[in-house]
Image (spheres, rainbow, N blue to C red):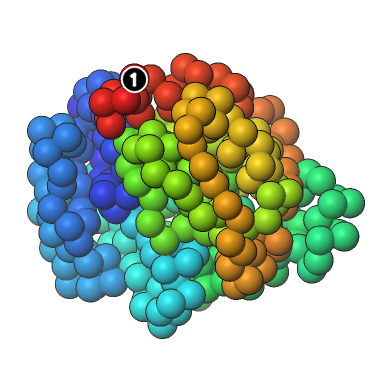
């Protein structure tokens, strides 16, 4: 039986990932600064209350457990990061470094490769202006890597740290540690979930509309109506991480991949939400700082490498995401007819 470590289980992706790994008979060890919610606690074989930026705490986990794969989800998101960039850098970069170092030491000791699956973000991109954003349309993995947020900067830094630990760690050392860490990364778009209420992300206007509509609340959207970025159903996000972790190593041509669900404007999300919750009311109250961040993210991403290398294909398009995934679950959550 394979054993997985998941950090950041209280976040949006953690819930779906834990349920899917449990269904596949993984032993699941989790680490987070918050206790697990009842919904997922029964799926965990072991839980550690741990701040990943605490090196001693991370090392304790690896002293107690042996892992086949690590899903490192813990991070401080874009909006939250801008409120405290020093803390975001500490958690996002130093925390990832602690995990990579501990995983490498364990792999060296056990003479066994450990897979390290890292969710990055479209926040790693930084387009210079709206004219360029409109002209480029689909952005490839190696384009426009000039993020303006500490979140995007830290994600990009961790992508490169992971690649370093996989291929070049201690180049001048007396022990060849190369290839002990099998680092694999995806850049996620905005995520839409019926299960968790988002907090701290700049793409949160999408899921926030949905949850407000389901609860019969009005909503103030903090970006312009025509703001357009890629999104994905949360159900697909969990599948992405598992599919990438299970892809044959010899088929992978990159260490970081774009993945894409559908690209929509804020207005299109509003109209789709209103279709299912006709009484939903929304006004646009632009937050200049958050708008500026969204304006640097691409309208769409080129995920042809993921399609080719590990047969990536989303289950949900925009319409199906709402009608078959979000709406049934969110109505059940809020007991809405």
Q: Is residue 267 left or right of residue 328?
A: right
State which quadrant residue 234 falls in.
top left
Residue on which disc 1 sits: 337
Residue at the image position 49 percent from the left and 37 percent from the top:
280
Label 1 element class: loop
Q: Is residue 69 left or right of residue 49?
A: right
Residue at the image position 66 percent from the left and 42 percent from the top:
267
Which of the two residues, 212 or 159, is positioned nearer the viewer here? 212
The outermost residue toward the front is 279
The outermost residue toward the bottom is 86
Residue at the image position 66 percent from the left and 28 percent from the top:
307
State which quadrant residue 38 falls in.
top left
Residue 207 point in image, percent of width and height:
46, 43
Instruction: Point out the image quarter for the C terminus.
Output: top left
* 194 relative to 6, above or below: above
Q: Is residue 289 left or right of residue 139?
A: left
Residue 19 visible in the shown view? yes
Residue 227 point in image, percent of width and height:
70, 51
Instruction: Point out the image quarter for the N terminus.
Output: top left
Residue at the image position 42 percent from the left and 61 percent from the top:
200
Residue 165 visible in the shown view? no
Which of the two residues, 124 or 26, is positioned nearer the viewer here? 124
């Amino acid at each position: 039986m394979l054993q997985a470590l998941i950090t950041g289980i209280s976040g949006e992706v953690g819930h779906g990932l834990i349920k899917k790994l449990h269904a596949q008979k993984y032993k699941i060890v989790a680490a987070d600064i918050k206790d697990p919610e009842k919904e997922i606690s029964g799926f965990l074989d072991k839980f550690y209350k741990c701040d990943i930026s605490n090196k001693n705490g991370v090392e304790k986990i690896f002293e107690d457990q042996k892992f086949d794969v690590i899903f490192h989800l813990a991070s401080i998101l874009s909006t939250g990061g801008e409120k405290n960039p020093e803390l975001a850098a500490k958690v996002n970069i130093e925390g990832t470094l602690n995990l990579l170092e501990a995983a490498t030491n364990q792999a060296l000791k056990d003479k066994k490769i450990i897979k390290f699956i890292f969710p990055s973000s479209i926040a790693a991109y930084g387009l210079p202006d709206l004219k360029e954003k409109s002209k480029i349309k689909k952005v490839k993995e190696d384009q426009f890597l000039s993020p303006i947020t500490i979140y995007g900067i830290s994600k990009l830094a961790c992508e490169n740290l992971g690649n370093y630990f996989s291929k070049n760690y201690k180049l001048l050392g007396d022990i060849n540690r190369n290839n002990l860490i099998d680092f694999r990364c995806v850049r996620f778009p905005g995520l839409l979930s019926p299960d968790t209420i988002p907090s701290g992300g700049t793409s949160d206007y999408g899921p926030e509309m949905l949850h407000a509509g389901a609860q019969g609340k009005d909503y103030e959207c903090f970006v312009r109506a025509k703001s357009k970025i890629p999104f994905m159903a949360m159900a697909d996000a969990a599948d992405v991480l598992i599919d990438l972790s299970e892809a044959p190593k010899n088929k992978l041509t990159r260490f970081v991949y774009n993945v894409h669900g559908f690209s929509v404007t804020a207005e299109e999300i509003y109209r789709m939400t209103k279709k299912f919750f006709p009484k939903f009311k929304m006004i646009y109250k632009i937050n200049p700082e958050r708008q500026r961040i969204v304006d640097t993210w691409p309208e769409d991403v080129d995920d042809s490498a993921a399609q080719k290398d590990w047969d990536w294909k989303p289950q949900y398009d925009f319409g199906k995401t709402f009608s078959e995934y979000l709406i049934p679950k969110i109505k059940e959550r809020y007991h809405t007819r």
